[in-house]
Image (cartoon, rainbow, N blue to C red):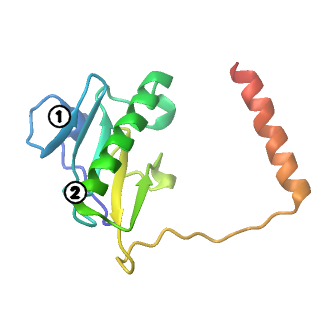
């Protein structure tokens, strides 16, 4: 996907400015917790962004309720994209942190209609660890989940 450069003045989040109505956006949907609007860098027609209204840099900064609201809105947008553009596929993309390819540090999801040979490559090198390693990873995650409870 094309890189977007946030041109907001230092200390000002472009998505917060969109939510506040300070800059224009082609809004598609809005509720108490989310805003859906057209991505300026349309990958394919119908490419929509779903952002949290409250500033949260990443998924990890959202409340569980905000995360649920974002997914509800993303599903709603996916249904609308399917109805309006009838793409044969759809990709939801959500990036966190610079190493995760996040370019705007305000939580958002991309809802992207997909077509064969549209130039989007979302492949990564498989590591295929042994079953024992997968079990060890699962054990680490279970311990982490226990500590979050």
Relative to 50, is 112 above or below? below
Q: Position of residue 122 (x, y in %)?
A: 49, 68
Q: Position of residue 8 (x, y in %)?
A: 18, 43
Q: Is residue 51 left or right of residue 62?
A: left
At 33% from the left and 41% from the top, the residue drawn is 76
Q: Is residue 113 left or right of residue 62?
A: left
The residue pinned by badge 2 equals: 84
Q: Nearer the viewer, residue 42 or 85?
A: 85
Disc 1 crowd rating (10 Å Cα; few below 14, some 14-19, many 20+) is some
The quadrant of the rendering that contains the C terminus is: top right
Q: Position of residue 133 (x, y in %)?
A: 86, 55
Residue 10 in sight: no
Q: Earlier in the sequence, mark 2 or mark 1?
A: 1
Residue 107 in sight: yes
At 80% from the left and 31% from the top, the residue drawn is 143
Q: Which mark is residue 125?
A: none
The residue pinned by badge 1 equals: 17
At 24% from the left and 49% from the top, the residue drawn is 6
């Amino acid at each position: 996907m094309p890189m977007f450069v946030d041109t907001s003045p230092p200390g000002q989040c472009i998505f917060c400015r969109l939510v506040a109505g300070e800059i224009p956006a082609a809004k598609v949907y809005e509720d108490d917790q989310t805003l859906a609007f057209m991505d300026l860098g349309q990958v394919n027609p119908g490419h929509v962004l779903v952002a949290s209204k409250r500033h949260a840099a990443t998924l990890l900064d959202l409340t569980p309720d905000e995360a649920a609201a974002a997914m509800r809105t993303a599903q709603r947008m996916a249904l609308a994209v399917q109805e309006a553009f009838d793409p044969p596929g759809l990709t939801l993309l959500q990036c966190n942190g610079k190493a995760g390819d996040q370019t705007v540090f305000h939580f958002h999801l991309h809802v992207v209609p997909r077509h064969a040979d549209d130039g989007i490559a979302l492949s990564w090198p498989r590591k295929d660890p042994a079953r024992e390693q997968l079990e060890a990873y699962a054990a680490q995650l279970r311990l982490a989940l226990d500590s979050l409870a």
